[in-house]
Amino acid sequence: MAAINRDDVAHLARLAHIEMSAEELDRMAGELAVIVDSVKSVSEAAGDDVPATSHPIPLTNVFREDVVGHTFTAEQALSGAPDSDENRFKVPAILDEA
Amino acid sequence: MSTDEILSFDEAMEKYDPVLGFEVHVELNTKTKMFSSAPNVFGDEPNTNVNEVDLGMPGVLPVVNKTAVESSIKIGLALNCKIAESCRFARKNYFYPDTPKNFQTSQYDEPIAYDGYLDIELEDGTVFRVEIERAHMEEDAGKLTHMGGATGRIHGADFSLVDYNRAGVPLVEIVTKPIEGAGSRAPELAKAYVAAIREIVKNLGVSDARMERGNVRCDANVSLRPHGRERFGIRSETKNVNSLRAVEHAVRYEIQRHAAVLDSGNPVVQETRHWHEDTRTTTSGRPKSDADDYRYFPEPDLVPVVASREWVEELRATLPEPPAERRKRLKADWGYSDLEFRDVVNAGVLDEIEETIAAGASASVARKWWMGEIVGRAKAADVDPGQLGVSPATVVELSRMVEAGKINNKMASQVLDGVLAGEGTPEEIVEKRGLAVVSDDGPLLEAIDAALAAQPDVADRIRGGKVQAIGAIVGAVMKATRGQADAVRVRELILEKLGVTV
């Protein structure tokens, strides 16, 4: 059983700004533990000679030349915004960063 | 907002030993952003230098800017760092509207450059070595403008407006190891360190390095410990310190504030402090807490950057001479005194003087022109001396005309004004303004005769061997020719006329 308890889930929920009820925390603690256990089985398949990787394909140095490409207009950029003002995205003030 | 108690700086120094640390963010001046092909340009209309990658839209793929990687390696090399054979990007997860992705793409445990140092020269010539922990690649965030109820714009509703033009601009964050042993020179060292970083990235050509535009930004960490204790005290991290002067003041203030807290028997709170230029104080930001759990993990959308040794050496070969070494070399070559050289550096005319000497002037002539004539005019016009419009070739031409006795210094100054007024080349202006020194002896002899006749007693004294009396006659001749005579030639002619040999 993976070490994901209810407190861990509550902590993650807070970090992710997700409001969760007591029942949800209980349920998710169980579900996440199963998920982490499932993922863990990958390490069983990989032997000691297989280094950890962050990418499935062994590629390196995928670069772009420093040449300007396309941009959006402000209207396009803001077209999906819930709210905007003066060609800028309008968001609720975040108080702890005043 | 409460005002913090502070101790005098001297008292703080008597009791405590400061330890510093800096995180300097350098915005690179690439044409495009770190992971998208949108332009990296300052000051454009909001949200016009963005595309789907910068806005963090679903399904987009970032692609690394090769030039930004090369610039980062150059910075690492200039800071005497090791360059990682292989390194990865990582996601730094946090929720704040300055990043639309809910994470910043950065580097975590694998910075591209690490274990370097920089020798910082303080004003009196003391050299202080600052160890560099790492320099890593990341992206800048968008710009928030806080608005709302308090400002009266929208009644009762606080909100922020976000411009993502800056989101994704390539950054290199340079982190020092803890800096110990600076003592009472800590504020001066802080300023000198940030100045040195700014100078290096500017010299490398990898950043515009304009602090007022946020191209170079400094977070200053300060902690105090009683003298003799090895363990570090609790530190504060002061953000928003964006001028060299502010860096010095902020470090000084935090030392004084920490000292007062420690004196009162309380622990220093580990927190972010905000610097306020107007009051030259800091105020409490947010305490370090769970919010700093960034849950870094390797960025799955990007592959590792592998810097082959060949590539690194290729880049190393392109590095310009480090600014500090260059200054040392130039000072020795030019033979200026410490004070003369410092004045030249402070006036910002090092490049100009170097070019003027390369164009054919002597070191002393180049200094005389730039420091004596051009810097003052630039100040009056409120531009950098190099931007005033005086080319090294003009300075050389003017000084040659003076040396040839064609014009005197006073006229040369007028000719310079003419050049700046767009009247043409020095040669043309001398012609047009009729400024040439009178070198035809005819008119001079006439003026000398007149002057001698007007002051027969002086003439007699000169004949009698009192040669120093000649000044009165030379003066009269210069006056008669409205300053256009060559004073040296006038003197010769007077002595000849009176039959005096010196």
Image (cartoon, coloured by chain):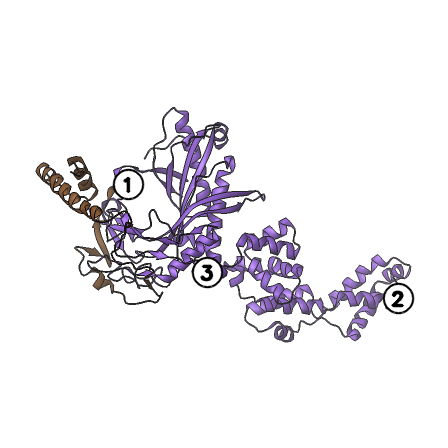
Q: Is residue B247 left or right of residue B362?
A: left
The answer to whether dots 2 and 3 both sit on one chain is yes
Residue type (three-letter) at the residue carrying disc 1? Asp
Residue at 48%, 49% in the rendered image: B195
Disc number for residue B292:
1
Task: Classify mark 1: residues with Cα within 10 Å, few (<14), some (14-19) or many (20+).
Answer: few
Residue type (three-letter) at the residue carrying disc 3? Leu
Q: CA distance from mark 2 to mark 3?
A: 72 Å
Q: Quick one: A33 or B190, which is closer to the camera? A: A33
On the question of residue B458 being in view, the answer is yes
Quarter of the image where one finds residue B303: bottom left
Q: Chain of mark 3?
A: B
The relative height of residue B160 versus residue B50 in the rendered view (above or below) is above
Return the residue found at the far left. Answer: A23
x and y, in percent, of residue A66 in the image: 36, 65
x and y, in percent, of residue B305 in the image: 35, 57
Residue type (three-letter) at the residue carrying disc 2? Leu
Badge 1 or badge 2: first in the primary sequence: 1
What shade has chain A been given?
Answer: brown
Q: Chain of mark 2?
A: B
Per the image, label 1 sits on a secondary structure element best described as: helix
Q: Which residue is mark 2?
A: B498
Asked whether the residues under the numbered discs 1 and 3 touch, taking CB atoms below 8 Å apart as contact, a structural biologist would say: no
What shade has chain B been given?
Answer: purple
The answer to whether dots 1 and 2 both sit on one chain is yes
Q: CA distance from mark 1 to mark 3?
A: 36 Å
Q: Which residue is mark 3?
A: B315
- Closest to the camera, between mark 1 and mark 3, is 3
Q: Quadrant of the N terminus of chain B?
A: top left
The relative height of residue B154 versus residue A75 in the rendered view (above or below) is above
Per the image, label 3 sits on a secondary structure element best described as: helix
